[in-house]
Image (cartoon, helix red, strand yellow):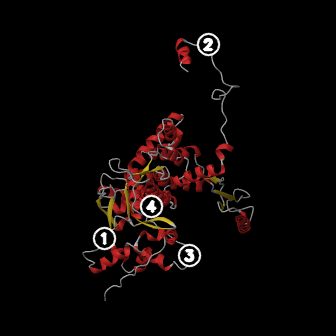
Amino acid sequence: MAAKKTSNKGMSVAELRDWYNKNSKKLDNYTKAKAALKNLADLKKGWSTKYETFDREKLRTYMKNPLRYYKQLIALSRYLYTRSQPYRKMLTYNASMIDTTYRSIVPVIDMTKRQPSDTKILKDYWTVCNIMNRSNMQGEIRKMNIIAWREDTAFGVWYSDPSGIFILPLPYDRCKVNGIYNDGCLGFAMDMSYFDGNEELVEMWGEPFITLYNEYLKDKQNNQWQTIPDNRAYCVKVNIDDPLNPIPPYIGLFNSIINLADTEDLQATKDAASVYKLLAFEMDVKGDDPDDFTVDPDTAADYVNKANDSLPPYVGSILSPLKVNPISFEKDQAADVNIIENATKNLYNSSGGAQILNSLNISTTIGWLSVLISDEQFAAGILRSQVENNLNRLVSAEKPNNCRIKLMPVSPYTKNLYKESLEKDFQYGVPLKLALNSLNGYTELETVSMAKLEEILNLRDLFQPPKSANTQSGNDTEQTKSPEDLSDEGDESRDKG
């Protein structure tokens, strides 16, 4: 019997975002996705995500042929992201280097042709500003950047409605890059067999999956891989020099990360052992006869049992006919701390980026600034242009216009330095007011609205900045030189008015 085709249904952006946040852990594979659907009606049920454990022997096997075992390596990266705090911190730090609020929206005007009317320019500008203003674009992009740094390639499909914009991440093991578009964006296809027996998920996700899955049902053998439409696809890749092969960017650090995790586990075991103590209750004898105890053994055992009832869990006891001193399991606190610290330091130093996370080695302001710029060039330089191209594609698909989004070459850590540069350029008349205020965290619409509000409230007259003595003018404060103090050039300039 032919499979049932899905109807043209789908969730709203708000519903889809809420559903994904509750069920993203369950979408790691097909069976978990199906289980997630069954539990949608009961949101009180908790999720239990299990990760496979890894060791160095498995890593050695994978490293011998990374292209063959790329899925296992990505799974290892996902496990380490959950297991290792330094690894998670490093990936999150790299992902945060791109902030889409630091941008300029630039109208595209062809100077060789008749210029469009001001109304047309304002309409296009308003369209893009409104799209960016009503969406949590920064949150969506940061989410995809973390996935890219963890898995090399981040696959997603974007949704838009009046409530905002949402990018739905897709499983790495069911997607593959299949081309590069003229605008520099990556195209990719998805394995539609992912939805077999799980058509409810297709209906919830709506288009373009409904059309693609129905196309797959016509010929499952030849139509298994369906290309996500370019106007709905979102795809960025860290190793862009090899677009077809997804290898985790930090594969070279996996051995060090596993070593660090093992060291932390050993440290935890030693910490637990260090609090244990053993109390030995010695049975005295009356004379030389070793069996002539001063206290009956049964009575002694009864007292030991009573003592055990009052001892904390980490203190044990024994009854011994021999003399035994208290036993403790102490450790060298300073040496253990140095082991963990040195292992973490070596991990950050070997990463090629994220040097600021090892901040104990940085002592000067110039050193901090140099490291931040280096980290930004490493992390943001790889993904910024891809993110920018995808943003422009999303906006153009939302509503065609003649404006382009340009992300500033700056991160949240270097924005003040870049802002100083813009302020100097602004003194020469460069049109940078909107760009400057975007670095303060305000969108274009917020900046324009605040300027209009100031005009309505007449704040420019009510609030005036104080003037210093050397900038004031007037009869009371103006200072002029006497004629005898003027130079020849000054006297000539005065005569000319």
Query: Farthest residue toward the top?
Result: 484
> Quick one: quadrant of the C terminus?
top right
Looking at the image, is mark 1 or mark 2 earlier in the sequence?
1
Q: Quadrant of residue 299?
A: bottom right
Looking at the image, is mark 3 or mark 4 earlier in the sequence?
3
Looking at the image, is mark 2 or mark 4 earlier in the sequence?
4
Looking at the image, is mark 3 or mark 2 earlier in the sequence?
3
Q: Position of residue 102 (x, y in %)?
A: 49, 49
Q: CA distance from mark 3 to mark 4?
A: 26 Å
Q: CA distance from mark 1 to mark 3?
A: 32 Å
Q: Amino acid at mark 4?
A: Tyr
Q: CA distance from mark 3 to mark 2?
A: 87 Å
With 274 as the anchor, is 27 left or right in this view? left
Q: Amino acid at mark 2?
A: Pro
How packed is label 2: few (under 14 Cα within 10 Å), some, or many (20 or more)?
few
Position above or below: 11 against 147:
below
The residue wearing badge 3 is 43
How packed is label 1: few (under 14 Cα within 10 Å), some, or many (20 or more)?
some
Label 2 sits on a secondary structure element that is helix
Question: Looking at the image, is mark 2 or mark 4 nearer the viewer?
Answer: 2
Q: Would residue 333 be seen by someone viewing this image from the given angle?
A: yes
Label 1 sits on a secondary structure element that is strand
The residue wearing badge 2 is 483
Q: CA distance from mark 1 to mark 4?
A: 29 Å
The residue wearing badge 1 is 226
The residue wearing badge 4 is 79
Looking at the image, is mark 1 or mark 3 earlier in the sequence?
3
> Quick one: quadrant of the N terminus?
bottom left
Q: Residue at x 35, y 51 (%)?
A: 114
Question: Looking at the image, is mark 1 or mark 3 nearer the viewer?
Answer: 1
